[in-house]
Image (cartoon, rainbow, N blue to C red):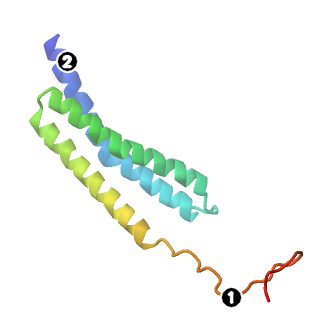
Amino acid sequence: MGEFRTVAVSLVLALSAVVWLVVVPLLFIRGAFQAAGWGGASGDLAGAQVSYTWASWLGVGIPLVGVVVSATTRRRGWSWFFGICLVVVAAVTMLKLASEARHTPPPPPAPTHCVEWSGGESDCP
């Protein structure tokens, strides 16, 4: 029974690595194609959002579960692999957050002069 469990855990870790290396990037590429409208149709932002959401959850979840499983089963190589995957995910997340913070437009300035409103009383002199 111990031999079967060892082989099963190794297969699950290997399959998880393949999914993380192949499927997650393909989901991001699919989302980019959908958002840009390549392939003949106009951009489908809702479909792209679904692809991006799945890719994000799988991109974080698979390495996280992989680190836990490989550490508890004392597989050092797999622990290193999934740990490095988590570092890559953290770096991409930090770059995205920094990009969003940099590209956020400033709020519009408040009016510095009297602005009359139509249809009602105005406090302008």
Which quadrant holds residue 7? Answer: top left
Query: Could you tell me how far apart the alpha carbons at marks 1 and 2 are, in whole angstroms?
Result: 75 Å
Task: Return the x and y of residue 71 as percentages of the image width and height.
Answer: 16, 32
* Residue 34 appears in the figure: yes
Question: Which one is in front in this view, the residue at disc 1 or the one at disc 2?
Answer: 1
Other-residue count near label 2 (Cα within 10 Å), few / some / many at <14 / 14–19 / ≥20: few
Position of residue 90 measured from the top left corner of the image (x, y, whole percent): 28, 53
Residue 14 visible to the viewer: no
Q: Which label sits on residue 113?
A: 1
Please say if 83 is above or below 116: above
The picture places residue 55, in percent across and down from the top left corner, at 42, 47
The disc placed on residue 5 is 2
Which class describes the residues within 10 Å of circle 1: few (<14), some (14-19), or many (20+)? few
Q: Which residue corresponds to the image point at 34% horizontal and 56% vertical from the top-left?
A: 93
Image quarter where the N terminus lies is: top left
**Residue beneath the point at 14% across and 43% down:** 80
- Going by the numbered disc 2, the residue's amino acid type is Arg
Residue at left 15%, top 38%? 79
Give the label on residue 54, or none: none
Q: How many marks?
A: 2
Label 1 is placed on what type of residue? His
Task: Residue lying at the far top in this picture: please name it.
Answer: 1
Horizontally, is 24 left or right of 122 in the view?
Answer: left
User: Quick one: SS at disc 1?
Assistant: loop
Which residue is nearer to you in this view: 4 or 65? 65
Secondary structure type for disc 2: helix
Q: Quadrant of residue 42?
A: bottom right
**For this view, does 34 lie left or right of residue 3?**
right
- The answer to whether the residue labelled 1 contacts the one labelled 2, judged by CB atoms less than 8 Å apart, is no
Whether 63 is drawn above or below 10: the answer is below
Q: Nearer the viewer, residue 3 or 82?
A: 82
